Image: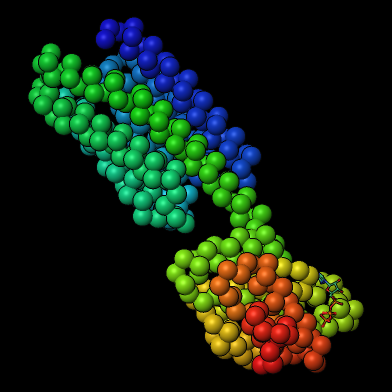
Amino acid sequence: MDFNAVLVLQLSLVVISGVFAGASYMAWRLFGRPRHALVWTVAYLLAMFQYFVNVVRAWFPVDEAYWLTANFASYVLVIAITWGHRERLGLETRWSQAFVVFMLLAVTQTIFTLLIPRMDLRVALGPAFVFVAMAHISWLLLRHGPQPLLPQRVAAGVHFLFGLAQGVAAAIALQFGAAPSEQVGALYNLVNFAFMPSFFVAIGVTIIFLLATDLATRLRLQATTDQLTDVANRRGFLIAAGVLLAGAQREGRPLTLVLADIDFFKRINDRYGHTIGDHVLAHFAETLRGCVRQQDTIGRIGGEEFAVIMGGASAVDARQMISRIRKAMLEQPLLEGQQRISITASFGIAEWQDDGSIEELMTRADAALYHAKDTGRDGFTVAADRNLPGMVSQP
Ligand SMILES: Nc1nc2c(ncn2[C@@H]2O[C@H](COP(=O)(O)OP(=O)(O)OP(=O)(O)O)[C@@H](O)[C@H]2O)c(=O)[nH]1
């Protein structure tokens, strides 16, 4: 590769870095300002700077000045990329840690460039650090996060391959000695120029893809969550219930639906106002959350109507859960200033039966709930077997 080809490559990397800086910045502006998007914007601006320094190498009065500037910029860039990943995964990173890593690299690089000039070590240090940083990022992407989503796994693979290519480049650089032979130099250039630009682009794409996937996940969660109580909304609840029903059908396990409706909620609104009414709903959801098992799903399926779907649980388990809820409602009423706002609720239980749909389960639980309301509230009713006459059986 002659000088001009290298120059053109470096120039195109300046432009590519600019594109990724712009894309990360737009993701920051448009996707709810996640901090890691801003960190990645800074990282790609640094990448622009680093590749620009490569383009104007001839402008430096001494080559050592170019070498140190380009390397220092690349260390900060790699630290920023790593920082962005850690931030995205909710892992704490301290400025002091990043600073110590940078200083160690900068001092080592300065020693092997100026004080004890060693061609092999000064060239190998940068790629070796990239290898370690990329392996760290891949490991983080596979180990952390809400769930190892496909884009996260792909990003882990791309970062690892980039790191691997850099690790090979570092190993080749270590064979340089005082000055690389023509063969070793050519091999180094091949690894560096064949893999580095393509993987650099691939990493940028996966980063933008991670930002977009995070947004999609957040929007999906928002679309299925009730803002007031933070439990699933009707839509989210029906999706979760459908998944549990499919599991129950597959494995022949029981499945039970409980509907819960706060008694005389209109009076709460009329007496204390709509805002306190909202607090009561949120408090009731919190009470439910404290009484269900981890695998159960709670949903707010109407104004003051909630539902709990319990996979692997029978009507007997549901009754026990309802006793826990009623006990908690009694013992932990909502406190609004000096006021204790006590509420009661009525419950309808329906156990899933072979071939029944979610709609049918809802209808049976609803009938049981209305029976509980009709017979005095503050209690529960179990829906009758669907093959028996009558809608409900007494508790
Ligand atoms: N504060 C508040 N009130 C709501 C919300 N959604 C529905 N409501 C109110 O909930 C009340 C429900 O009243 P009703 O359906 O008559 O039921 P109820 O008063 O609980 O009586 P029973 O269910 O028969 O015990 C209505 O006054 C609605 O305005 C909400 O998001 N916030």
For this rendering, which residue is in front, 133 or 71? Answer: 133
Residue 41: x and y in percent read: 51, 35
Q: Is residue 107 left or right of residue 140?
A: left
Res 143 quadrant in image: bottom left
Residue 386 appears in view: yes
Residue 205: x and y in percent read: 46, 32
* Residue located at (40% from left, 55% from top): 144
Q: Is residue 58 above or below residue 242?
A: above
Quadrant into which the N terminus falls? top left
Ligand 1 lies in which image quarter? bottom right
Residue 335 appears in view: no
Residue 223: x and y in percent read: 66, 54
For the image shown, how many numbered marks are present on the structure?
Answer: 0
Q: Is residue 332 left or right of residue 339?
A: left
Q: Is residue 338 left or right of residue 259?
A: right
For this rendering, which residue is in front, 240 or 265? Answer: 240
For this rendering, which residue is in front, 296 or 46? Answer: 296
Quadrant into which the C terminus falls? bottom right
Q: Is residue 13 left or right of residue 361?
A: left
* Residue located at (72% from left, 90% from top): 379
